[in-house]
Amino acid sequence: MNAAEQSRYLAAMGIPVWRPKAEMALPVAIEVLEPPTQAHTPMPESLHLATLADEPAIITPHSKSVEVPSSAKAQIISSADLDWEALQQAVSTCTRCSLAKTRTKTVFGTGHVQADWLIVGEAPGADEDRQGEPFVGRAGQLLTSMLAAIGLQREQVYILNMLKCRPPNNRDPSVEEVTLCRGYLERQIELIQPKLILVVGRIAAQHLLNTDAPLGRLRGQVHTLPSTKTPVVVTYHPAYLLRKPLDKRKAWQDLQIARQLTQTWS
Ligand code: URA
């Protein structure tokens, strides 16, 4: 991706794009920094806040585990013996929970099945339920821009949701639904073997990391998925960022943390 394209994507994310003084047509009173020149550019200095360590700290444990209410009788149902095709088939015909009655299509996931990056969202919305693909609505467009801003096309990553069916009226998933669906997610992670998981949104992050810590405490650092030891970076859900564009700056920081991790890959 060239600098002009990346600038467009950053602009689409609502991240100010800095240009060298000479290029600035207007004498606007903003900080002047080097513009991004390549797909993988250093984080602009002004975004390199004191709270952001150069070497992301690996943190665990979390404050408190999410408690599963005793009313939720669900147990994680393992899909450990299924290959990719069988797993897709199992999801497409799943009737483990009542969402099977209200969904239009299941949403298994999309992208490169051997991707280094796995993006985990919460659950399909109305557009995804209709099309059977994750993140295809407005939030999905912003997610695409966020990825593009760090030089990633959707086809290079794998994108999926914790839940494979839409909760009616976009309500939060219940613990039971998440638990019943979790075996699919775990098998997807085992088969994809990503080097990095980027989780968008509080609900997916809390369930994946088994914590009730608020998103503000989960973002901005690197976690480890207990089962596979995969590094996990948490950031805001793009739907939230559409409502609170000022937090896009923090999301950009999180993306930079994730990107920094890729520099340790061989
Ligand atoms: N929100 C999500 O978490 N996932 C989608 O696929 C769409 C919206």
Image (cartoon, helix red, strand yellow):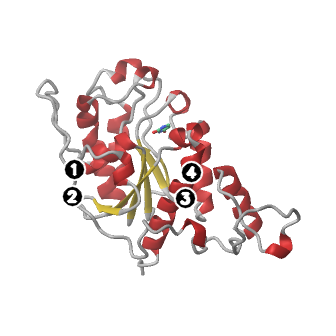
Question: In the figure, residue 123 lies in which quadrant?
Answer: top left
**Residue type at the position of mark 4:** Lys
| 24 relative to 140 in the view: left or right | right
Image location (x, y in percent) of residue 104: 47, 23
Q: Residue at x 43, y 32 (%)?
A: 106
Compared with residue 59, is residue 262 higher up or lower down, i.e. above or below? below
Pointer 3 and pointer 4: residues touching (CB < 8 Å)?
A: yes
- The residue that mark 2 highlights is 227
**Residue type at the position of mark 3:** Trp
Label 2 and label 3: CA atoms lie apart by: 27 Å
Q: Is residue 136 visible?
A: no
For ligand 1, tell me if the residue under mark 4 lies within 8 Å: no
**Residue type at the position of mark 1:** Asp
Earlier-in-chain disc, 2 versus 3: 2
Determine the secondary structure under disc 3: helix
Pointer 2 and pointer 3: residues touching (CB < 8 Å)?
A: no
Image location (x, y in percent) of residue 152: 58, 62
| Badge nearest the viewer, 1 or 4 | 4
Q: Which mark is residue 81?
A: 1
Earlier-in-chain disc, 1 versus 4: 1
CA neighbours of label 3 inside 10 A, class few (<14), some (14 to 19), many (20+): many
Label 3 and label 1: CA atoms lie apart by: 38 Å
Question: In the figure, residue 53 lies in which quadrant?
Answer: bottom left
Image location (x, y in percent) of residue 39: 63, 70
Q: Nearer the viewer, residue 20 or 97?
A: 20
CA neighbours of label 4 inside 10 A, class few (<14), some (14 to 19), many (20+): many
- The residue that mark 3 highlights is 252
- The residue that mark 4 highlights is 248
Earlier-in-chain disc, 2 versus 1: 1
For ligand 1, tell me if the residue under mark 3 lies within 8 Å: no
Q: Residue at x 61, y 74 (%)?
A: 41
Determine the secondary structure under disc 2: loop
